[in-house]
Image: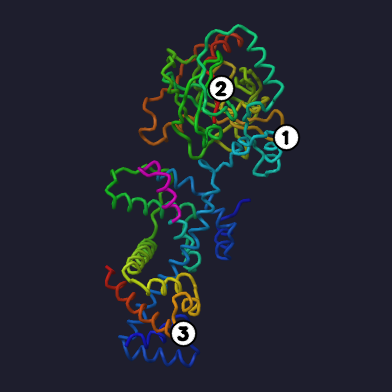
Amino acid sequence: MEEVVLEKIERYLKKLMNSEERDAFEKEMKEHPSLQQKVNEYQKVFTTFDAIQQRSALKSKLDAFHNELPKQGKVVSFTDYFKEKKFAIAASVALLLSFGTAGYLLMQKNAEGVEVTKNEAERSRAPQPQKKKIIMKNEAQYTATAFMVSTKGYLVTAKHIVDDVDEIVVENSDGEQFKAELVYMDPKKDLAFLRITDTSFVSPKALPYAFAGDISELGERVFTLGFPQENIIYEEGVMSGRCGFQGDKASCQISLSVNLGNSGGPLFDDKGNVIGMISSRQKDKDRVGFAITVKSITDAYKNAPKGTFDAKLKFNSSNKISGLKRSKQIKKLESFVYQVKVD
Amino acid sequence: MGYSDAELIQGIRNKDDKALKHLYVTHYNMVRHFIVSNNGTEDDAKDIYQEGIMVFYEKVLSGNLELSCQIKTFLYAVCRRQWLKKLVRQSRFIGKIEESESLAEISDDDAIDIDERENDIKKMQGAMSKLGEPCVTIISDYYLHNASMQDICNKMGYTNADNVKNQKYKCLVRLKKIFFINRG
């Protein structure tokens, strides 16, 4: 009966035998190949039990790690904190966290309470033409910036803004709002592509700006347009570093005052070429910002799985505004920069 | 905090969950990108990645880790292989693979180990499902959940632990038979 020897086999395999017993058993195995065979088979059974047990213990650990992953991207996004109701608390939490010192630029709605209220008050007094407004299911939690990369209604913004959101609405500088959808998030970089899906959206004939393949020289003047407040805001600065935070080659450093809400905004060179997208700023430093390069944006597009984009994006290479004065340039550019409202 | 590959391996060997977590978090996106770019879903990515981590973990603990490349490359190669197998199995393979990392094939020995382990676990699950009561409970409580003979005796209403022990051996003989019949 196999059951009888099985106890011995198990004790042998689990190394519970004393040396005397073990020697005797091994001798018996040598003499009886059929016993050896059985031992081998039970060993397989036991190691498989161990593997299953080990895997199930490991699996629950891995699941726990998995649940702590940000939905997309390994960058720990500040978004999660900004989604908290109280910006002040969230900001202080964010400051306490010590993953690097690059902080994202996101403006929570009403974060700057007084300013926002003032803007809205002024707006409501001024006579307003009929503008299409979209009622979001919930009040937008926070806002940031995006800009157009294709006349087909594709926009680029920072991934940390649209990561894990239910609803995206973009608003142009005229206050017109459009529904948009998330098309693609770069797995590695803080980049996302959106598409305006609203039927009321009229494709512009062409983009006024070109996308510059080369990073600007250090010291060159740069500027951005974005929505750190409800209204579009112009900021200028200089190109200050060829690499981004901690030597990141996919981005560059700029000395420019970037604020919450500027994330996802376009970075222009002096001629009005797009040279990057504002992604983050160094905490505790007022004028140290980072922008993701145009090359990273075009690479992200190229590397996206086939079928992600239903239209081919052609990154415009002819700049129509390089000869204009800055104020004129801005007039041309601003309608291609959008405020992103997400919930 | 950063870990070098050597520190990660040492950490896992010492059952340091922080090291394990670091490993897990660090490479998920790479594998996710690969799976999602190749006809997979987020859930597929999670499953395949976890398999890859398990393979690596087992290799580290078993002490037969001869890593001739970075952990990252090893994980990518294992996950890639597992995913292609799955695609072929489900006839979803379309003949073209989008690579996101430079490619390293895992060694034949590793491949055999991985397949054998996977096969064993599947066969065991199959055998357990055919075993019937009271054997399933006895075997899984004792061998998979570390219950004592006395616990099982109380739970199953046996009069004494010796009876359970005899029953356990009977069950084990049967299980082994089904397991080996099913093999291959």
Secondary structure type for disc 3: loop
Look at 64% across and 30% down and name the residue there: A289
Tag 2 near tag 3, CB within 8 Å:
no
Secondary structure type for disc 1: loop
Q: Is residue A157 magenta?
A: no
Give whichever of discs 2 and 1 has the lower sequence position.
1
The N terminus of chain A is located in which quarter?
Answer: bottom left
Reading the image, the residue beneath label 2 is A339
Name the amino acid, label 2.
Gln
User: Where in the figure is residue B119, as x and y percent of width and height?
Assistant: 34, 64
Mark 2 is surrounded, within 10 Å at the Cα level, by few (under 14), some (14 to 19) or many (20 or more) other residues, namely many
Q: Is residue B48 magenta?
A: yes
Please tell me the numbered disc located at residue B160: 3
Q: Check the residue under mark 2 and report the chain it is in.
A: A
User: Where in the figure is residue A107, as x and y percent of width and height?
Assistant: 63, 28
> Residue A87 versus residue B109: which sits nearer the camera?
A87
- Give left or right: position of A320 versus A100: left
Secondary structure type for disc 2: strand
Name the amino acid, label 1.
Asp
The C terminus of chain A is located in which quarter?
Answer: top right
Look at 42% across and 71% down and name the residue there: B140
Q: Nearer the viewer, mark 2 or mark 1?
A: 2
**Magenta region: which residues?**
B36-50
Q: Nearer the viewer, mark 1 or mark 3?
A: 3
> Residue A295 versus residue B150: which sits nearer the camera?
B150
Reading the image, the residue beneath label 1 is A284
Discs 2 and 1 lie in a common subunit: yes
Q: How many marks?
A: 3
Mark 3 is surrounded, within 10 Å at the Cα level, by few (under 14), some (14 to 19) or many (20 or more) other residues, namely few
Look at 52% across and 9% down and name the residue there: A130
